[in-house]
């Protein structure tokens, strides 16, 4: 495996969203491309799973009013919210915000980070009752 490079979060986000396609061929192609993209950056699906669902920061932690997403990359947190939010739960503004944050090259501002964490907590409450 190659040395770890910064994962291409914008591409990973696109591929994760394509996994939900109604077209089987498109979803399968997205899955294969996801694995290939991770591998090129020196990562694998285990790494991605750990980022999305680690006990310290992910949705499988014991439920609480304020989940601790400490240590989770903001792009992965945004992708998690997009993946876990029930249909119609997010407003257009929230959805657009998450899409934008998932593609950021630099960390969001303190205010944006707070909004992201609050949004993640709300999504977690409805997605992981």
Image (cartoon, rainbow, N blue to C red):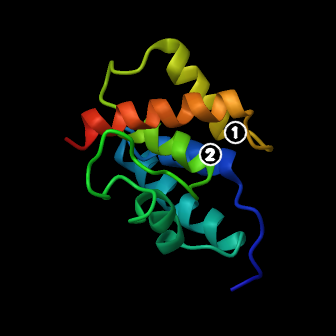
Instruction: Determine the CA span between mark 1 and mark 2.
Output: 7 Å
**Tags 1 and 2 in contact by the CB under 8 Å rule?**
yes
Q: Earlier in the sequence, mark 1 or mark 2?
A: 2
Q: Quadrant of residue 56?
A: bottom left
Which percent across, then down, holds residue 70? Answer: 54, 54
The crowd level at tag 2 (other Cα within 10 Å; few <14, some 14-19, many 20+) is many
Residue beneath the point at 62% across and 73% down: 43
Which residue is drawn at the image coordinates 48% and 31% (left, top)?
A: 118
On the rendered image, what quadrant is the C terminus found in?
top left
- Looking at the image, the residue that sits furthest to the front is 65
Outermost residue toward the bottom in this view: 1
Identify the residue position indicated by label 1 in the image: 103
Farthest top residue in view: 92
The residue wearing badge 2 is 75
**76 shown above or below 86:** below
Mark count:
2
Residue 52 on image: x %, y %: 46, 57
Q: Secondary structure at mark 2?
A: helix
């Amino acid at each position: 495996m190659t040395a770890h490079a910064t994962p291409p979060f914008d591409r990973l986000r696109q591929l994760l969203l394509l996994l939900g396609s109604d077209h089987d061929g498109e979803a399968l192609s997205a899955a294969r491309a996801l694995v290939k993209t991770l591998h090129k950056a020196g990562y694998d699906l285990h790494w991605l799973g750990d980022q999305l669902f680690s006990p310290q920061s992910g949705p499988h932690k014991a439920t609480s009013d304020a989940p601790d997403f400490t240590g989770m990359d903001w792009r992965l947190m945004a992708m998690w919210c997009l993946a876990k939010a029930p249909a119609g739960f997010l407003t257009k503004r929230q959805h657009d915000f998450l899409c934008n944050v998932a593609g950021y090259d630099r960390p969001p501002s303190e205010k944006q980070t707070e909004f992201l964490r609050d949004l993640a907590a709300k999504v977690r409450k409805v997605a992981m009752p």
